[in-house]
Amino acid sequence: MTPTAQIPAPRTELPGVDLERVTFEQAKGWRCVLCGARLTADRPLGVFTTDKGLLTDPTELWACALPCP
């Protein structure tokens, strides 16, 4: 029998980002959660959740592939 994969718990903090104010487009991965730019090349930041706003369910957030301005 193989061990079951552990799913990491969602994080509740992202330095410099108010997770309760993430927009719909940011939550869907269409815009960078750090700078708001439209994503054409991206990188995952991890799964996050909050008590209020759009991230009440665990949501994977994305940012610009290159560091944001």
Image (cartoon, helix red, strand yellow):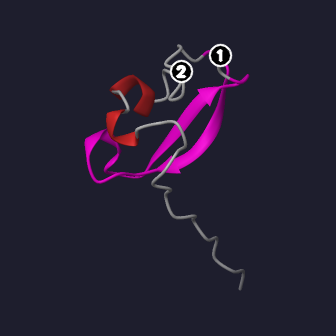
Looking at the image, which residue is at 73% across and 22% down? 66
- Give whichever of 4, 38 is nearer the camera: 38
Marks 1 and 2, how far apart in space? 7 Å
Percent x, y of residue 8: 57, 64
User: Relative to residue 34, is residue 39 depicted above or below?
Assistant: above
User: Relative to residue 67, is residue 9 depicted above or below?
Assistant: below
Residue that extends furthest to the front in the rendered view of this protein: 16
Q: Say whether residue 32 is magenta.
A: no
Looking at the image, which residue is at 30% across and 39% down? 54
User: Relative to residue 2, is residue 46 depicted above or below?
Assistant: above
Q: How many numbered tags mark residues here?
A: 2
Q: Residues within 10 Å of mark 1 (few under 14, many from 20)?
A: few
Percent x, y of residue 38: 53, 13
Q: Say whether residue 46 is magenta.
A: yes
**Does dot 1 land on a helix, a strand or a loop?**
loop
Badges 1 and 2: C-beta atoms under 8 Å apart?
A: yes
**Does dot 2 land on a helix, a strand or a loop?**
loop
Give the mark nearest the N terminus, 1 or 2: 2
Quadrant location of the N terminus in the rendered image = bottom right
| Amino acid carrying mark 1 in the image | Pro
Percent x, y of residue 20: 33, 40
Looking at the image, which residue is at 38% across and 32% down? 22
Q: Which residue is mark 2?
A: 35
| Amino acid carrying mark 2 in the image | Cys
Q: Which residue is mark 1?
A: 69
For residue 45, which numbered disc appears in the image? Answer: none
